[in-house]
Image: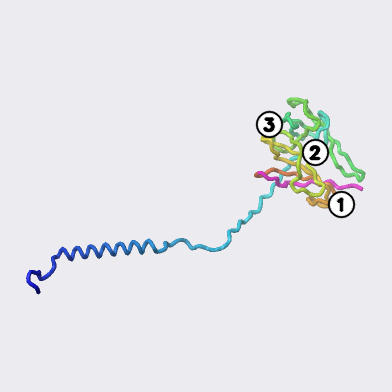
Amino acid sequence: MLPGMNARPPLRRYRHALVACAAAAAVVWAVAAEAAPRKRGRRVKGKVVRVERKQPQLATSAHVCSLYDIDIGYCRQEVAVGDVGLVLDDQGVYGRASIRSVSRVLDACGVPVTWNIEIDTSQLTSRDYAYNAVVVFRHGIVEEGRSMPPRGAAPADRPHEQITNVIDDDGDSRGDLMVTTYPCDEPGVGTRSQRPSMTCYDTWVEHRDEWRHARTDTVAACY
């Protein structure tokens, strides 16, 4: 041992060394922890496929009859004396009217094809409605409701299908109830035949901005 040197280094040098080693170890551990991937839920590779849910079946008992005079009109479905409906045209609703009389119109085969009606107008707010006014049975309509022009293509666009009635039942100037007609050989199936076995009448209900089929009525053809 050389003169002037201590036999052992001071204790504080060891402390400094230990502190330095601990700090270095902490840095290494922090870097390693940051670099290590975090555990997450298992990822499944594949294509995202949208599963279409089956649309709920819609149904309605609504029936639209046409007026060709103040209190005289016709229906394409059977009605009865005492049935009550709402009279409306493209200007609005005129109130409730009940059927006073009904007479069946038969074809050459003896099958009823329309039902002529006479309505009681005594409860209406006015009798000054258009010649193409309608009476709507079994369907709720607010005071601001009205009938609308049958424009555009029918929802199903079957051969020779035409829109006969469009009803705005809530006053927002958009159709909510629609009736279409077309030649058919079985209910709901249009045909281009020149001698179809039936005439189909489809009733549609607006649901979430699209027309949904609710009912098909048929009248047998007579030749």
Q: Position of residue 189 (x, y in %)?
A: 79, 52
Which is more N-terminal, label 3 or label 2?
2
Front one among 137 and 128:
128
Q: Where is residue 5 in the image (x, y as percent from the top left)?
A: 9, 69
> Magenta stretch?
209-223
**Residue type (three-letter) at the residue carrying disc 1:** Ser
Which residue is identified by label 3? 144
Residue that appears at 90% across and 43% down: 107
Query: Label 2 neighbourhood size at 10 Å, few (<14), some (14-19), many (20+)?
Result: many
Q: Does the magenta stretch include residue 117?
A: no
State the separation of the CA atoms marked 1 and 3.
41 Å
Predominant secondary structure, magenta span: strand
Left or right, residue 156 beside residue 20: right
Query: Label 3 neighbourhood size at 10 Å, few (<14), some (14-19), many (20+)?
Result: some
Residue that appears at 70% across and 36% down: 168
State the separation of the CA atoms marked 2 and 3.
26 Å
Residue extending farthest to the bottom is: 1
Left or right, residue 208 beside residue 155: left
Which is more N-terminal, label 2 or label 1?
2
Which residue is identified by label 1? 193
Q: Where is residue 195 in the image (x, y as percent from the top left)?
A: 89, 50
Front one among 118 and 11:
11
Which residue is identified by label 2? 79
Question: Circle 1 — which element?
Answer: loop
Which is more N-terminal, label 3 or label 1?
3
**Residue type (three-letter) at the residue carrying disc 2:** Val
Q: Quadrant of residue 111?
A: top right
